Amino acid sequence: MLWIFERKGEQMRCEIRRDGVGAGYEMIVTSADGSQRMERFDETNDLIKRTFDLQRELMDTGWRQPKS
């Protein structure tokens, strides 16, 4: 799953995918400058909570999802 956010001509991405080595999940956030950070989750509930928290953080700081 991939979300894209925009703010003042910049773009950042949040990708969620299955962990390549285990049974968990990875969340990869690519910042506007191209840097990336990854968070790993073993439990689906933890991933869902973190996803909602991250989306709220981004929206609170002016990031928006582009209109289709």
Image (cartoon, rainbow, N blue to C red):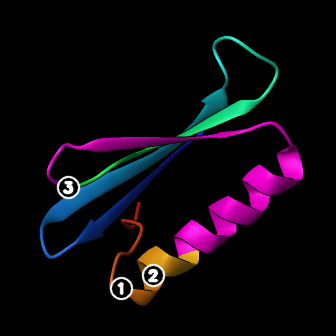
- In this rendering, the answer to whether 7 lies above or below 60 is above
Determine which residue is flagged by label 3: 32
Which amino acid type is shown beneath numbered disc 3? Answer: Ala
Residue 47: x and y in percent read: 74, 51
Residue under label 2: 59
Give the CA distance from mark 3 to mark 2.
15 Å
Q: Residues within 10 Å of mark 1 (few under 14, many from 20)?
A: few
N-terminal-most mark, 3 or 2: 3
Rounded to the nearest angstrom, the CA distance separating label 3 from label 1 is: 14 Å
Q: Quadrant of the C terminus?
A: bottom left
Residue 22: name its quadrant.
top right
The amino acid type, in three-letter code, at marker 1 is Thr
Labelled pair 2, 1 in contact (Cβ < 8 Å):
yes
Q: Which residue is mark 1?
A: 61
As for residue 54 lying within the magenta part, the answer is yes
Residue 7 placement (x, y as % from top left): 23, 74
55 and 25: which is toward the camera? 25
Mark 2 secondary-structure assignment? helix
Q: How many badges with numbers are in the image? A: 3
In the image, residue 46 sits, relative to residue 36, either above or below, namely below
What is the distance, in whole Å, between disc 2 and disc 1 at their CAs?
A: 5 Å
Q: Is residue 47 left or right of residue 14?
A: right
Q: Which residues are magenta?
A: 32-55
Q: Residues within 10 Å of mark 3 (few under 14, many from 20)?
A: some
Residue 64 vs residue 43, the one in the foreground:
43
> At which x and y percent is residue 11?
24, 57
> Which badge, 3 or 1, comes first in the chain's sequence?
3
